Amino acid sequence: MGYAQDILKSVLEKNPGESEFHQAVKEVFSSIEAVFDVHPEYEKAGILERLVEPERQIIFRVPWIDDKGRTRVNRGFRVQFNSAIGPYKGGLRLHPSVNLGIIKFLGFEQIFKNSLTGLSIGGAKGGSDFDPKNKSDVEVMRFCQSFMTELFRHIGPDTDVPAGDIGMGARELGYMFGQYKRLKNAFEGALTGKGLEYGGSLIRKEATGYGLIYFINNILEKKGKTIKGTKIIISGSGNVAIYAHQKAKELGGIVIAMSDSSGYIYDPDGLDLDEIKIIKEKNNERISEYKKKYPDARFNENSGEIWKIKCDIALPCATQNEIDINGAENLVQNGCFIVGEGANMPCLPEAGKIFMDNKVLYAPGKAANAGGVAVSALEMSQNSMRTQWSAEEVDEKLKGIMAGIYKNITMVAKEYGDEDNLVKGANIAGFIKVANAMLAQGVV
């Protein structure tokens, strides 16, 4: 048994029941075993033992009062995983499914994603099992203020800079920033994804979706192809999915299907993005409402069956583990040639193996969806300088970052004997930068 497998066994024993965290560690470790033949100093310094153990795990009670005057209690989390290359950076997820194992999986992934951007940001994640859906603005404000009353003592612009994630939109971020400012008596960049009126960055809302398409475009250009005219499936209909759709459309791609938790909508001639935006962003309705304007479009209540649709490019942008073996096999059989992860770990490991075994170009989330955290880091820079860049400046920087990620991971994959294996390239490239920083800083 090799070094990585020894540490993996220890992770499974020490973290029982945390299946998503186990999956994330297995996926990284399966790619980086060859690194220790080239860099035996990593094993000697115990890099993996330290890498899989968060530097700090914070779990706290979040009491708040609902509109009927009843006391409610949720659980809050912040896992500060690794600060070797910069202050902790990673979103806050508000969803009933949130637990420690999910936050640890997301935080572990964030280490490598942030490393790949080339920017000085470490890995972290946080959130709560609070569900903002069907809550009044006042209830959400009470929750956010209570959450931040504990979290504020653990974050700051040079320590830990959270951002948004699932369930953590502009409303929630605004309430949290207001409470942070009130408690610290300081207006500083301790959160990103803020409103433009109080220190936010242009292109932040669009960044993950735009970055995903820029990354896919880099793959296509390397293969002598173009996105123009390709048929694209995008799961989800939040910010990532909507702005991936928008950028794909700008470049000539045709998005034929999108989904939400109630099902998916499909039109072989392409979906009307403006109508999707009205349904999801303006009215906050189910995607099935699309049929009211376009009755010929098809709606299926089983959102998982979206992967049965014939397409050229598949972009899972909803949630973790949404593409299983059947979904992967359907995509392969129907001629899909690129899968790009807009969500975090949306493909089961077995699905990823099917893609790679069948020569489908498979872009892992830690590379393909790094645009969001990259622009968050650019927001940190703007806050530090008390300035705001134009949309064109931010977009140009985002394009450059995504091109740099693709160039870096393909170069590393080739160096380790597997040029088209973007998963291996991303894991090794992200790991080596962090490992070298940890090595330089001693045993801390």
Image (tube, helix red, strand yellow):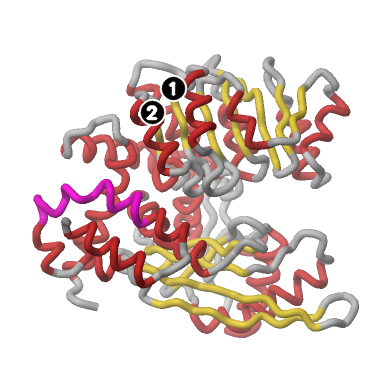
Would residue 420 be found to the left or right of residue 36 on screen?
right
Q: Is residue 7 above or below residue 117?
A: below
- Callout 1–callout 2 Cβ contact below 8 Å: yes
Visible in this render: residue 11?
yes
Q: Quadrant of residue 355?
A: top left
> Disc 2 designates what residue?
361
Q: CA distance from mark 1 to mark 2?
A: 6 Å
Q: Is residue 193 above or below residue 219?
A: below
Q: Residues within 10 Å of mark 2 (few under 14, many from 20)?
A: many
The answer to whether 241 is drawn above or below residue 48 in the figure is: above
Looking at the image, how many numbered discs can be counted on the residues?
Answer: 2
Asked where in the image residue 262 lies, by quadrant, the reply is top right
Is the N terminus in the top left, top right, bottom left or bottom right quadrant?
bottom left
Circle 1 residues within 10 Å: few <14, some 14–19, many ≥20: some
Which percent across, then down, holds residue 143? Answer: 72, 75
Q: Position of residue 216 (x, y in %)?
A: 44, 30
- Residue 367 pos. (x, y %): 39, 44
Magenta-colored stretch includes residue 37 = yes
**Which SS class for mark 2?**
strand
- Main structural element of the magenta stretch: helix, strand or loop? helix
Q: Indicate which disc residue 384 carries.
A: none
- Outermost residue on the right side: it is 68
Residue shown at the point (37%, 50%) measured from the top left: 117
In the image, is residue 403 part of the stretch drawn in magenta?
no
Instruction: Describe the element under mark 1 as helix, strand or loop.
Output: loop
Q: Nearer the viewer, residue 253 or 345?
A: 345
Q: Amino acid at mark 1?
A: Phe
**Which range of residues does the magenta coloring cover?**
25-39
Q: Nearer the viewer, residue 29 or 224?
A: 29
Q: Which residue is mark 1?
A: 337
Residue 95 image position (x, y, % from top left): 65, 61
Q: Is residue 185 visible?
A: no
